[in-house]
Image: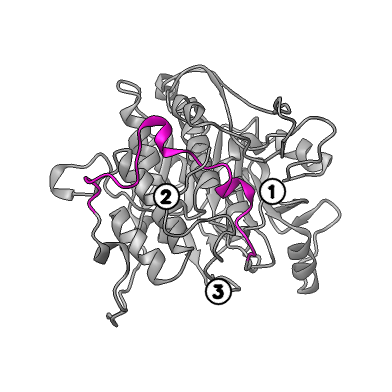
Amino acid sequence: MCSGAKSTNHGTSNRENLLKLKDLGYSPYLTNISMTRYELEPPKSRKRPRKRYAPCEIQFLPAVDDLVEPAHYENFTQFSLNYILKEEVPGNGFFEPLFGGHQSLQDREETYHAKDQTLHCGFVRGTNDYPSTGFDLDANDRRYMATCHVAVSSCIFGSSDYLRRPTKSRIGSYAKKNVCFVMFMDELTLATLSSEGHMPDENGFVGLWRIVVVKNLPYKDMRRAGKVPKFLSHRLFPSAMYSIWLDSKLRLHADPMLIIEYFLWRKKAEYAISMHYDRSCVWEEVLQNKRLNKYNHAAIDEQFHFYQSDGLVKFNASQLPVLPSYVPEGSFIVRAHTPMSNLFSCLWFNEVNRFTSRDQLSFAYTYLKFTRMNPGKPIHLNMFKDCERRAIAKLFHHRTNETTDPLPANLRLGKTSVQG
């Protein structure tokens, strides 16, 4: 997650574009929802001894000179994805263009099928007489990003973090010449970093980072705005075969090509993300978000009730779950831009666009529903140990502390209202 500054509301697409549960027979009040009142509300905090987490050794190849993409990458599930670029004004004349578009419940359900399709995946525009829906980039930056075949990206919005440069001594000469390192930021962040001595040179670089300024952020919630570069690298880097995402609190400490070889090629994976360092069950993640006031509690409950009504169950290690954990540490993601990986990224982004911006709450639901609806078409996901993440990226604190988001103005307390 790219951290964000304090926000004043969630943005329209978060609440006003929500689903009507009853349209497909879902109900937030089903009796099989296994969540007691005690479980829904976090207990009073009790002091626990602080755990210490350390990196573990990774057996990277000694050099990148002889790296060759493995032949099995041709065997991943193949289909064609296209994206909705524009939405027309409906017949009633009332229309507000949204970056995530206006996705109906039935549309949402259909997108979970791994097949040739055209779907919502951000960057949706209105008709020509409507203003941009956001995430506007300079034409020169777009041209540069279109040339990238391997991309490493991060973002800082709302001047919420420091600029952390990759450890140059760990980056090989091949990656320095052939990998794009792109840091997305808004104009406020650029001004702050420039005042601190991080002024881009005449080509737009600060060290290895190519600084790409984003104008007109699509969400007022900076945390949600950061999900655009986090999940939609295949949209931002249309020619890229691989991408690595790292949160702005991390400093890259390993060569990108060695990372791709280790986490993707060697594991025969097309998507890699680490397990959470402390939690494995979404129920635990819900409680922790409430304990720390990471997001409005009513909005979390609404999302969580919906997911339970659509089949989300507790993580149970004794029953050989399909993943080693249902909670990721989403600050570091390695992806091959295959159809399954791209579709999964779109689906996960659409959940964050529709519900809360806490993507750890929607990861397991999205993955489990995706695999359930595509028997015989697996997404090859490598969920690796958190200690491996700590070995390839040094962790720092954010510049600003995260605060709880205010209650959305259109959320009706006492009753779950999911609108479509």
Rendered location of residue 87, percent (x, y): 69, 28
Q: CA distance from mark 2 to mark 1?
A: 21 Å
- First in sequence, mark 2 or 3: give its number: 2
The residue sitting at 62% across, 68% down in the picture is 6
Determine whether 145 is above or below 74 in the image: below
Residue position for label 2: 303
Q: Kindly report the secondary structure that dominates the magenta region of the rendered protein.
A: loop
**Residue bounds of the magenta highlight:** 7-34
> For this view, does 96 lie left or right of residue 290?
right
Give the residue at x 42% y 59%: 414
Say whether disc 1 or disc 3 marks the residue closer to the N-terminus: 1
> Badge 1: how crowded within 10 Å, few (<14), some, or many (20+)?
many
Q: Is residue 417 left or right of residue 285?
A: right
- Please identify, in this view, whether the residue under mark 2 or under mark 1 is nearer the observer: 2
Residues at marks 1 and 3 touching, judged by CB atoms closer than 8 Å: no
Between the residue at mark 1 and the residue at mark 3, the CA separation in whole angstroms equals 22 Å
Which residue occupies 29% across, 74% down?
Answer: 43
Q: Assign a secondary structure to mark 3.
A: loop
What amino acid does circle 1 point to?
Pro
Q: CA–CA distance between discs 2 and 3?
A: 24 Å
Q: Is residue 11 magenta?
A: yes
Depicted 116 relative to depicted 21: above or below: above
Q: Nearer the viewer, mark 1 or mark 3?
A: 1
Whether 266 is among the magenta residues is: no
- Using the rendered image of the protein, determine whether residue 56 is visible from the camera's viewpoint: no
* Residue 359 % position (x, y): 46, 51
Say which label, 2 or 1, has the lower sequence index: 1
Q: Which mark is residue 401?
A: 3
Give percent across and percent down for residue 224: 58, 53
- Helix, strand or loop at mark 2: helix
Tell me the amino acid under the disc marked 3: Asn
Return the residue at label 1.
218
